[in-house]
Image (cartoon, rainbow, N blue to C red):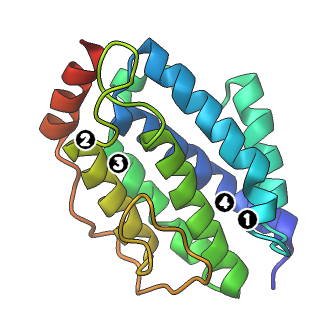
Amino acid sequence: MTDANALATQVLPFAQDTLMASLKASGAGFWGMLKEATSVANYIAHAPARFPGNEIIPPLMEGLKSRIHTDKYAPSGDLRLVDVNNLLSRIAEVNNVLADAGEAGGQVKVFLYEMAASVIAAAGTGLFGSGERVTAGEAQFMDALRQTLGLVNISTLEDTATSVNTEQPTSEAAPVDPDVTQADAAVTEE
């Protein structure tokens, strides 16, 4: 396998894109964003136990933590300017980066998916984010992300993969309908 630190450095932009696309797809308001931030931090803190022996994920996590703390992960810092479909297209490139990484590479894809799921499932609709947990737009985004990453053994947000089986990943995942995610965002902001 290629040097784990070098792979983590190459994967970091895709992890950032995954996080940004998840935040955009969630459409959460202020309270929901607080729940999502806590959920992502908790997921990242527990990821080493989830993927023991994976040498790519620990340096990837450190890179994410340092970028988040310095606010370098947010393009312009305005989620309204984020195009989820553009980010999904860029995320598809992670398949090439991880092509020769074997099981560890598959686990990184699961890490990215589960990190996104931690954002999506963290807050619901409504004023304090306690309403419907996963909207149609969020489910559509997660399915597009699953297809983009080539994950066949994850079909719902509740599924977790103990062994990684991947299908041929595709950059041709069904595009996320911005009207659905915008409608979800309008409901979330109420």
Decide: is 15 above or below 93. Answer: above
Q: Residue at x 50, y 40 (%)?
A: 119
Q: Nearer the viewer, mark 1 or mark 3?
A: 1
User: Horizontal placement of 123 versus 135: left or right?
Assistant: right
Label 1 CA crowd tier, 10 Å (few <14, some 14–19, many 20+): some
Mark 2 = which residue?
135
Q: What amino acid is found at the position of numbered circle 3 in the picture? A: Asn
Question: Which type of secondary structure does the marked residue at label 4 adopt?
Answer: helix
Quadrant of the rendering where the C terminus is positioned = top left
Sequence-first tag of 4 and 1: 4
Q: What amino acid is found at the position of numbered circle 1 in the picture? A: Arg
Question: Which type of secondary structure does the marked residue at label 1 adopt?
Answer: helix
User: Horizontal placement of 43 versus 140: left or right?
Assistant: right
Distance CA(mark 2)–CA(mark 4): 28 Å
Sequence-first tag of 2 and 3: 3
Quadrant of the image occupied by residue 55: bottom right
Label 3 CA crowd tier, 10 Å (few <14, some 14–19, many 20+): few
Q: Which mark is residue 11?
A: 4
Rendering coords of residue 15 (x, y %) = 60, 51
- Which residue is nearer to you in this view: 18 or 48? 48
Q: Which mark is residue 86?
A: 3
